[in-house]
Amino acid sequence: MVPRVAKENKNKFAILGILKHESISGYNIRKYYKFRGLRFFWPDLSLNQIYPTLKQLEEEKLVKKKKIEEKSRISNIYSITERGKEELRKWVSGIPSIREMDNMFDMTQEVLLKTYYGGATTAEDSKNKILELIEVMKEKKVGLKNFEKHLKLTLKDHEDHPYFLLSVLMGIRIADAVVGWGEESIKMLKKMN
Amino acid sequence: MVPRVAKENKNKFAILGILKHESISGYNIRKYYKFRGLRFFWPDLSLNQIYPTLKQLEEEKLVKKKKIEEKSRISNIYSITERGKEELRKWVSGIPSIREMDNMFDMTQEVLLKTYYGGATTAEDSKNKILELIEVMKEKKVGLKNFEKHLKLTLKDHEDHPYFLLSVLMGIRIADAVVGWGEESIKMLKKMN
DNA sequence: GACTACATGTAATCGGTTACATGATTGG
DNA sequence: CCAATCATGTAACCGATTACATGTAGTC
């Protein structure tokens, strides 16, 4: 029997990354998510998800809970443990398996989250991930360009084809945007050394 | 008690849209997904998901199953019913609630799937959806530009800030790409009339 | 004979959403 | 005093993934 590998709970690392940046309560993790820009590219981190995940992280000894009274208010402040930092670093530095993905949004999201928490590992690790993303996106673009050519020739064969073409054009735009971003990012990361 | 509104099963409509284009088997829905470009921007449609969904669609009388023997092979060919076509049209023509979303990828994906199946409704419907996406993306960009300004000023205050900046820059690139695509698409849809 | 592609499903489980539940504090 | 915000959770359910299960047809 092959051991079952559960789909990674990425919200776990999203939360761990926030706690690496600062020690805060569950309620404030939600605010952090909402007000630091993470929400623009990462799926909703709701409180109903944050609290159980924190409980799980505590059981795994990746975070520590402390009851703190502040301005006559009691809240549970969570902070990352050494073990948690190491777990985060391992996850962030790991090359995401974007080669097995087709969906351009999925792969971009994955690399973006790891880039966002790039402070948890070395600039070199971040650079490598972005370089791979650039490469894969360029390959996707070649495939999309072929679709475009084919659809432009068969535009009038089926009422659906013009709409298929529109979605392919979006794919090409996304690929270009990601490659452009990647190249700009590589330059910025080099300057940081 | 407020009635529970289940999260829309979008794969249901993805499959319905494929069957509107052509009558095929579950196995071939998977191939369609893989080879028509849908995979570039829509999450994996696996066979383990396709079969139960087809069963559900059949129960709802949105599709019809027919056992067909072809080249000594028996397969279940599914075709869309009139009711299914109407259900698809209603879904495609509905304005997605992207204003309640923060995640730029989510909103783009949602509009893209509806654009992909634009043949199920009028060009006018597709245009309206894209116009709204352009507007929302422009708003997101304003927010991201503010983040960018702030992060550039505080770049050296925290080791994480350069990485936050990188993710914000990606957001800006995505926003620009989507707006550019939207404007190009509007022009193409106008020509189609 | 082994491998790939065709072809269809079920069972167990996980991750995430919706809904429910409770209570304190602050500001108008 | 009422609304918004602070603050933390549980229960039920749904959607999607992983794993399991089975069998045929064609090709190297």
Image: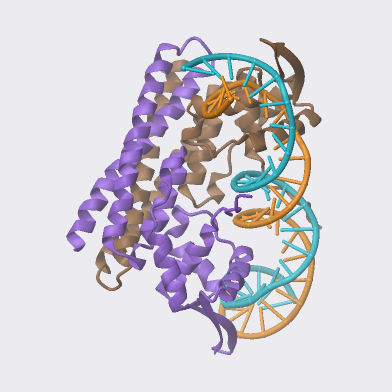
Chain colours: A brown, B purple, C cyan, D orange
Q: Is residue A131 left or right of residue A74?
A: left
Nearer to the camera, B166 or B183:
B183
Is residue A186 toward the left or the right of residue A7 in the image? Answer: left
Q: Quadrant of the N terminus of chain A?
A: bottom right
Looking at the image, residue A47 lies above or below residue B67: above
Q: Nearer the viewer, residue A169 or A141?
A: A169
Q: Residue at the spot x=40%, y=45% of the render? A: A138
- Does A78 sit above or below residue B14? above
Q: Residue at x 74, y 20 (%)?
A: A81
Quarter assignment of residue D15: bottom right
Expressed as whole percent of the image width and height from the top left, the position of residue A92 reads 61, 30
Closer to us: A117 or A53: A53
> From this viewpoint, is residue A124 visible?
no
Q: Can you give x and y, in whole percent of width and height, for residue A141 in the image?
A: 37, 49
- Evaluate whether residue B160 shows in this view: yes
Count of marks placed on residues: 0
Q: Residue at x 63, y 68 (%)?
A: B52
- In the rendered view, would you say B69 is above or below B3? below
Q: Residue at x 44, y 51 (%)?
A: B110
- Corner quadrant of residue B151: top left
Percent of width and height locating residue B41: 45, 52
Q: Nearer the viewer, residue B56 or B3?
A: B3
Q: Residue A34's x, y, as percent?
A: 52, 29
